[in-house]
Each structure stands twice: as structure tokens, then as C-alpha cells.
Image: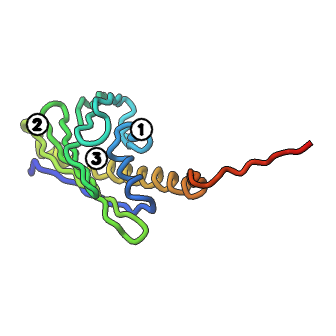
Amino acid sequence: MPQHYQAQKSVTIEADRKAISSLISDFNHWKKWSPWHKVDPTIKFTLGEPNSGLGAHQTWQSQWGFGEMTITTISENKISFNILFNQDHIINATITQQANGAAVDVICHVEGQANTPFLSGYMALLSEYVLTNTITLGLNNIKTVAQLEHEKQKQNPPEDPMQPAITQVNSL
């Protein structure tokens, strides 16, 4: 059985690319969309320093084990992560954004290799199955959060600091 596995899913989001990037590259925002609390309610995250941008770091502990994630590269359209699970299972993940008219296609690609003696092939199959479903849930959550925030901004645009404030003066 193969020990290597990969999962890839995509979603189209009608929101600003920078807003989507912020949801992904800032671990402070992950609680808004991360699927892991649904998958494993026992999971506890701890944010490291820095907690956003290149080098951002977070760790977790749950009934299934522990791990850490670090943002290793960030460009205009791509964010990459290294994930270490239970100190021996290395996973690489990349989230890419591609313009699609007024929307953005967000593609998440994850790959890793199971290293558990005697069980690696089965662990690879299980990892691929769990990750495929978890990525789908996570991308759909990002879509919901990004589109709701985008709509809110359209309804309540920031005030233009160059426009004078209009005040009403009551006369006696």
C-alpha cells in the first residue's frame, strides 16, 4: 500500500482576494472558519509568535495527538504551510488563489507521507479520506465568512476622511 497521500479541493468565493488571504495567513482569524473543532471537539490551539504572516506558528493538542503548523511562504496568490503531526508525520499544504472574474478560486492542496511502522498504508488512506472532507468543510467555511464580511463592507462602506461630516444644528 502507498504511504504517500494527497488531497486537493477548491471553492469559488465572491470576495476580495486580500480579505481571503487575511483569513488564511492570520491564525487569529482561524477560529472564524477552521473545521477542526467540528472534526475533533477536544482540540485546543495555542498561537505562537508571530501569529500572522510569514513564520506564523500555532500548535494544537487533542485526543488524537498533537502538532504544529508554520506558514513557510506567502506571495500575492499563495500561502504554504508545514505541518508536523505527532513529531513524525510531516504534511505540506498550499492554498492558492486565482482570479475568476469578480470572484476568486481558492485551491487547497495537502500532501504527506504516513510513517507509522506496519500501518503506513492504512494511515495514508485514512489521512487522505479525513483531509479531503476536512478541506472541503474548511473551504466552505472560508467562503461563508469571506462573503459575509464582503457583504457587510458593501452595506457599510468606511467613511471617506476627505468628506466633511454633516452635522445638524438646532436653533432656538
Residue at the spot 43% in from the left edge and 55% down from the top edge: 143
Is residue 19 visible in the rendered structure shown here?
yes
Residue 65 pos. (x, y %): 24, 29
Which residue in the structure is indicated by mark 3? 130
First in sequence: mark 2 vs mark 1: 1
Mark toward the viewer: 1 or 3: 1
Q: Is residue 51 left or right of residue 125?
A: right
Asked whether 35 or 51 is in front, the reply is: 51
Q: Secondary structure at mark 3?
A: helix
First in sequence: mark 2 vs mark 3: 2
As shown in the figure, which amino acid type bears the numbered disc 2? Thr
Residue at the spot 71% in from the left edge and 51% down from the top edge: 166
Asked whether the residues under the numbered discs 2 and 1 touch, taking CB atoms below 8 Å apart as contact, a structural biologist would say no
Asked whether the residues under the numbered discs 2 and 3 touch, taking CB atoms below 8 Å apart as contact, a structural biologist would say no
First in sequence: mark 1 vs mark 3: 1
As shown in the figure, which amino acid type bears the numbered disc 3? Val
Residue at the spot 24% in from the left edge and 29% down from the top edge: 66
Q: Is residue 119 left or right of residue 31?
A: left
Residue 50 pos. (x, y %): 28, 33
Q: Is residue 113 above or below residue 48?
A: below
Asked whether the residues under the numbered discs 1 and 3 touch, taking CB atoms below 8 Å apart as contact, a structural biologist would say no
Q: Secondary structure at mark 2?
A: loop
Mark toward the viewer: 2 or 1: 1
Residue 162 pos. (x, y %): 57, 54
Which residue in the structure is indicated by mark 1? 31
User: How far is mark 2 from mark 3, CA to CA?
Assistant: 17 Å
As shown in the figure, which amino acid type bears the numbered disc 1? Lys
Which residue in the structure is indicated by mark 2? 116
Total numbered circles = 3
Is residue 128 visible in the rendered structure shown here?
no
